Image (cartoon, rainbow, N blue to C red):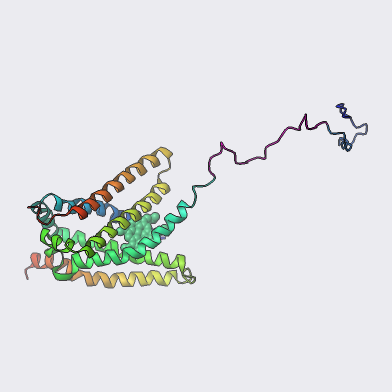
Amino acid sequence: MWSWVAHRVTGVLIFFFLFVHVLDTSLVRVSPEAYDEVVATYKTPLVALLEYGLVAAILFHALNGLRVIAVDFWSKGTRYQKQMLWAVVGVWVVLMIGALYPVLGHAARELFGS
Amino acid sequence: MSNNTVKTDTTASGIGPVEEAGASPYSADNPAPVIEPPRKRTKKTGRATRGNFELYAWLFMRLSGVVLVVLVIGHLLVQLVLDGGVQKVGFAFVAGRWASPFWQVWDLLMLWLAMLHGTIGLRTIINDYAERANTRVWLKGLLYTATVFTILLGTLVIFTFDPNIR
Ligand code: HEM
């Protein structure tokens, strides 16, 4: 039940992000300066934190999506759906820890000095 | 041959007499009225189903999901993790990647699949929560407009990208 709510919420979130993301990338057709100016804001600590949240949403949606697919197509999927949910959460936590440094490292260095 | 007088049972049984063979009041020139079966589908009823659209939509969500895992996770690795993370991204970086048809196709496929997947997903959500038919029509109209706009814009940008724009 809650995994379904989270899947739905993250799905909507990713969709709205994708819409904006196509718009900002389209600036490469305007001028290199316009594009670089917008991307510069993505390199600030605040947006880095938002980015980390976006990665969290995408990774959960992707992993849980694979679980939904397994429940639908794997003959034993329904029996193991709960174990698979724990696997999703486990892999998600590991990946989020792994993303900590690449996504937030620069912001941390900027905020707290290197 | 036929006599049209209705016989009444003289007994009090309440059940009328069975017509004698050959005593039918109808003939080829005077056919019995046709009683249409209830719920029979006629030209006026419209199609019974929308075909298998919902099945294909369900299947597409799953197939595109599997492909998107590879495309999106790869995208995140390239843009946010490898080689300095997001700090390296800029016009020059985009120009470098879209010089290769491999990444052009990657991004094009990701754009189309993610937009269609997200649009079908949002369509389900609109159908779930928007209870008035009018609201549903408007929200879906808005959704499909945004989808067509975004897919066209993104496709155009990938195909017409010019590294020497300035
Ligand atoms: C990364 C790989 C992805 C996987 C494996 C995946 C998997 C799935 C699956 C299997 C469903 C169907 C759930 C159901 O029918 O109950 C679904 C729904 C959905 N997905 Fe994804 N998806 C992925 C990426 C995306 C992206 C990039 C977006 C946004 C553009 C998105 C937005 C949605 C939405 C809005 C729904 C509908 C949620 C609902 O009906 O509750 N997904 N996803």
Q: Quadrant of the C terminus of chain A?
A: bottom left
In percent of the image, x 36 and y 44: which residue is there? B140
B91 in magenta: no
- Main SS type for the magenta part? loop
| Drawn side of residue A104 relative to residue A89, left or right | left
Question: Residue B134's image quarter?
Answer: top left
In the rendered image, the vertical position of residue B146 relative to residue B5, given as above or below? below
Residue A10 shows in the view: no
In percent of the image, x 42 and y 47: which residue is there? B127
Residue A69 placement (x, y as % from top left) = 41, 65
B38 in magenta: yes
In the rendered image, the vertical position of residue A46 relative to residue B23, given as above or below? below
In this view, which residue lies farthest toward the right? B10
Name the foreground residue: A92 vs B143: B143
Q: Quadrant of the N terminus of chain A?
A: bottom left
In percent of the image, x 22 and y 63: which residue is there? B101
Residue A59 placement (x, y as % from top left) = 29, 65
The magenta stretch is B25-47
| Drawn side of residue A3 relative to residue A15, left or right | right
Question: Residue B117's image quarter?
Answer: bottom left
In the rendered image, the vertical position of residue A79 relative to residue B123, given as above or below? below
Residue B79 placement (x, y as % from top left) = 19, 64
| Drawn side of residue A22 relative to residue A88, left or right | left
Give the tally of numbered discs. Answer: 0
Residue B104 placement (x, y as % from top left) = 22, 60
| Drawn side of residue A47 relative to residue B1, left or right | left
The image quadrant where one finds ligand 1 is bottom left
In percent of the image, x 29 and y 70: which residue is there? A93
Residue A50 shows in the view: yes
Name the foreground residue: B45 vs B102: B102
